[in-house]
Amino acid sequence: MTRWLQDNMPKIVLAPSFIAVMVFVYGFIAWTAWVSLTRSRLMPRYELDSFIQYERLADSPRFETAMVNLAIFGTLFIVIAMVLGLLLAILLDQKIRTEGAIRTIYLYPMALSMIVTGTAWKWILNPELGIEATVKGWGFANFEFNWLVDPDMAIYTVVLAAVWQSSGFVMALFLAGLRSVDEEIIKAAQVDGIPTWRVYSAIIIPSMAPIFLSAFIVLAHLAIKAFDLVIALTGGGPGYATDLPATYMYAMAFSRGDIGQAASSAMVMMLVVFTIVVPYLYSELRTKDD
C-alpha cells in the first residue's frame, strides 16, 4: 500500500485540481455552448433550437457596434502599447541615469486593478472635473476635451486608459528581451561602424520575434476580456458607443435576462480567443518539434 501511494502520489495530489478544472471550466464551457443553441431567456431551457441565438446576434445592431469597437480598441491598444513599450525599453537599454525612476513610473500602473484605472481616468477626463475644467480655470474658456461624453471619441478614452495601464508591462517584457541579447554581437556590429539604430532594427529586434508574439497574445487577451475597465470608465456609453462583446454579454445576462443571447455572445468571444491562441500554440509546438 505504501509503495502504491509513493508511485501514485503526484496523480492523487493533482486529481482534485484536474477534476475541478474539468467541471468548473470545461464543463461550464460545454453548458454555455448548449444553452447558446436554445431559446433560453431568464431561465435556461435545454431543448435545442438550431442557431436561432446566433441569428439574433448577427441581426443585433448593438452587437455589431460591440464588434466594431473591439476591432478599433484592440488594434489601437495593441499597436500603441507595443510601440510605446518597445521605445521605452530601448531607452532604458541605453543604461541611462534615470532608468530606475522611469521603470518605476511605468510599472506602477500594473499594480492597479482595471477598476481603479477606469475610475481614475473617468475623473481625469470628466469635462466638469478633469483636464477640461482645469484648462478652462487657467483662462482658456473655449478649450474642449470632452471625449468621455462624445459618442464618436469615447472609445479612444478606453484605448488611452488601457495603454497607460499596460505599456509598462510591455516595456518590462521587451527590456528583458533586449538585455538577453549577446553583447558581443552588439559590440562587433559597433566595431564594424554600424549605427545604433541599425543594430536595433536589423539585429536585435528581429531576434526578439518570440517576445513580440508573447506580448501580442497577452495584449490581445486583455483587449478581448476588457470588461471592468469599460464599466468603470464609461459604463459602455454614451449610449452603446463603447460597448464591447464582454459588456454586451453582461448586459444580456444580468440586465436583459436573456441567457441564450449572452451564451451565444460568449461563444463568439471564445472563438475570437481561439483564432489568436491556436496559431500561437501551433507555432510553439512546431518550434519544439524542430
Image (cartoon, rainbow, N blue to C red):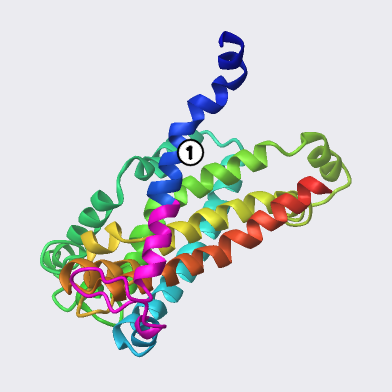
Asked if residue 171 lies left or right of residue 113, the reply is right
Residue 240 lies in quadrant: bottom left
The image position of residue 285, as x and y in percent, is: 72, 50
Can you tell which quarter of the image residue 146 is in? bottom left
Segment tinted magenta in the rendering? 26-53
Q: Give residue 152's position: percent from left, percent from top.
A: 30, 82
Disc 1 marks a residue whose amino acid type is Phe
Q: Residue at x 61, y 39 (%)?
A: 176
> Looking at the image, can residue 196 be seen?
no
Residue 153, compared with residue 10, is above or below; it is: below
In the rendered image of this protein, does residue 145 appear above or below residue 289? below
Q: 244 or 13, which is in the foreground?
A: 13
Circle 1 sits in a helix, a strand or a loop, which is it?
A: helix
Say whether residue 61 is magenta: no
Which residue was labeled with disc 1? 18
**x then y, percent, for residue 48:** 37, 77
Q: Residue at x 73, y 57 (%)?
A: 201
The reply, left or right, for residue 4 in relation to residue 225 is: right
* Viewer-closest of 5 and 146: 5
